[in-house]
Amino acid sequence: MAVKIKIDIVSDVVCPWCAIGYKRLEQAIQEMGIQDQIELEWQPFELNPHMPPEGENVQEHIANKYGSTPEDWKRSQDHMAEVGAQLGFTFDYFEYMKIVNTRDAHVLLDFAKERGKQTDLKMRLVTAYFSERKDVSDRKVLLEELKSIGLDAEQAMAKLDNDEARYEVQSKEAYWQSVGVSSVPTMVFNNTSALTGAQPVAVYKQVLMELLAQ
């Protein structure tokens, strides 16, 4: 029987390095031809859990949080755009881009997981935010993205006002933080080892080969 590898990816939908890390992991898996041996689950992490509904300008947010200058931010944007392009992913940063609250997105990702479409929704939301200038905290946007991947949008959106569903997201976040996850992306392999940050494709291949050999 073929070895199965469980990968938990702790991430946020507005985290650029999470998108890059996943695309590199995906490339490693495809080049190794082991798609059928991977069980992947996305776990919630909110970079800004207390972000108000109106969001905050990205550049101002980065400056306030990390002390970055506009020049630092521009260099970072250019670098991410270049890395993304190499992986077939578009980062379209723009002047009025906002950091937004992602709690609703994580609730919907739980809904999608139960229906086998979690990765589809995750990448749809990440693409909507980084490539299509969409506000992924806007429930109208979320509704359209759910429909675009064939999920029951009305049933999913009902979850957003369900206290139990929202508490479940917070509980998962608390669990991952309790086992030491403090930055994203963090990829946990078979609940035994983890990699933090967007690693090179070769690093993911090495980890996967070692797990397959066990």
Image: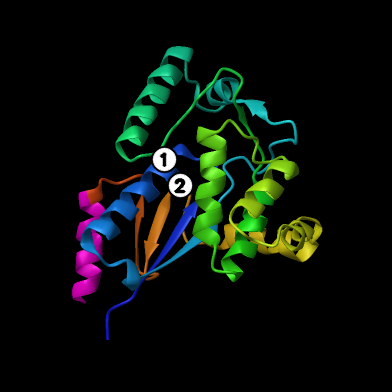
Q: Please tell me which residue lies in front, 20 or 63.
A: 20
Can you give x and y, in whole percent of width and height, for residue 196 in the image? 37, 50
Q: Is residue 168 positioned above or below 214 on the image?
A: above
Can you give x and y, in whole percent of width and height, for residue 121 in the image? 56, 54
Can you give x and y, in whole percent of width and height, for residue 129 in the image? 56, 37
Label 1 Cα neighbours within 10 Å, binned few <14 / some 14-19 / many ≥20: some
Q: Earlier in the sequence, mark 2 or mark 1?
A: 1
Say what amino acid the circle numbered 2 marks: Val
Q: Confirm or deny contact between disc 2 and disc 1 (CB under 8 A).
A: yes
Q: Looking at the rendered structure, which numbered label has been put on residue 2? A: none
Quadrant of the rendered image containing residue 84: top left
> What residue appears at the point 38 percent right and 30 percent down from the top-left corner?
80
Q: Can residue 103 be spotted in the picture?
A: no
Q: Is residue 66 left or right of residue 5?
A: right
What is the span of residues highlighted in magenta in the rendered image? 202-214
Residue bearing mark 1: 17
Q: What is the spatial separation of the Cα atoms under label 2 and label 1, in whole angstroms?
A: 8 Å
Give the prevailing secondary structure in the magenta stretch. helix
Q: Is residue 195 positioned above or below 95 on the image?
A: below
Residue bearing mark 2: 184
Q: Is residue 5 positioned above or below 78 on the image?
A: below
Q: Is residue 158 left or right of residue 41?
A: right
Q: Can residue 60 be spotted in the picture?
A: yes
> What residue appears at the point 18 percent right and 74 percent down from the top-left corner?
213
> What residue appears at the point 32 percent right and 66 percent down from the top-left corner?
35
Can you give x and y, in whole percent of width and height, for residue 31 in the image? 23, 57
Q: Please tell me which residue lies in front, 16 or 178.
A: 16
Q: Is residue 212 positioned above or below 205 on the image?
A: below
Quadrant of the frame with the N terminus = bottom left
